[in-house]
Amino acid sequence: MNKKWKAFEEKHPKLAKWLYQLFYFYIFSISVTIFQYLVFTFMPYLLGERLAAAEFMWPQLPISIAGFKYSWNVLGYEVARNAAGEVIIGGGLGYFISYEAGAFLAQCINFPLQRNITFKSKGKISWQIMWYFIAWVLISLFCNAINGLWLPIAQYYFQPAVYNLLVTFITGGVSMVIYFFVFKIIFPGRESARET
């Protein structure tokens, strides 16, 4: 297999580079997505019911979708309740902290893997960390805005472990597409490494 890949790489160097990057990008992205799912699912239980019952939402714009009236948020989540109206783990400030902690820790794992293995970048690391952080914040806000539209409805129909899968799938899918092209910019290869 190695000989076949070498021959392909020599014949189609640009395509081979893209395929290599897509393969490792996907493997590492899926791995950190699984890690995020585990944090989203289990960390709210560690934080407890007190934080799950604490409402934390911004900008709290009232909307109505499919007969559900709730507040749309870019940051934070409504308090999750069962059919009896009791607070359950999986919403509120506890879920927000878990979501952001999981996403941030995943990026701390993802950054060196993508930089050093996928894109083999030798660019200036401080510049790359700054742009990676800016991209993470913007992508997170975008994904949170999307999640704010449907998550309150999903919380009504599904258990936290199920809607965490949906959050992970949607956030991970959207993020992966955007991040790949962000990485192509901020992680230049050896031949074009940014020196400033």
Image (tube, rainbow, N blue to C red):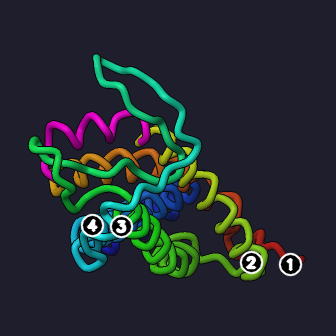
Q: Name the residue type under label 3.
A: Gly
**Relative to the observer, which residue lies in front, 5 or 178?**
178
The numbered mark, 3 or 1, whose residue comes first in the sequence reads 3
* Residue placed under numbered mark 4 in the picture: 34
* Residue placed under numbered mark 3 in the picture: 94
**Relative to the observer, which residue lies in front, 189 or 164?**
164
Identify the magenta region: 148-159
Mark 4 or mark 1: which is in front?
4
Q: Residues within 10 Å of mark 2 (few under 14, many from 20)?
A: many
Residue displayed at 72% across by 66% down? 131
The numbered mark, 2 or 1, whose residue comes first in the sequence reads 2
Left or right: residue 85 compared with residue 150: left
Residue displayed at 70% across by 81% down? 122
The numbered mark, 4 or 1, whose residue comes first in the sequence reads 4
Q: Name the residue type under label 2.
A: Gly
Mark 2 or mark 4: which is in front?
4
* Residue placed under numbered mark 2 in the picture: 123
Give the percent coordinates (x, y) of residue 196: 89, 77
Q: How far apart are marks 2 and 4 (CA)?
A: 28 Å
Give the percent coordinates (x, y) of residue 145: 51, 41
Q: Do the residues labelled 2 and 1 touch (CB within 8 Å)?
A: yes
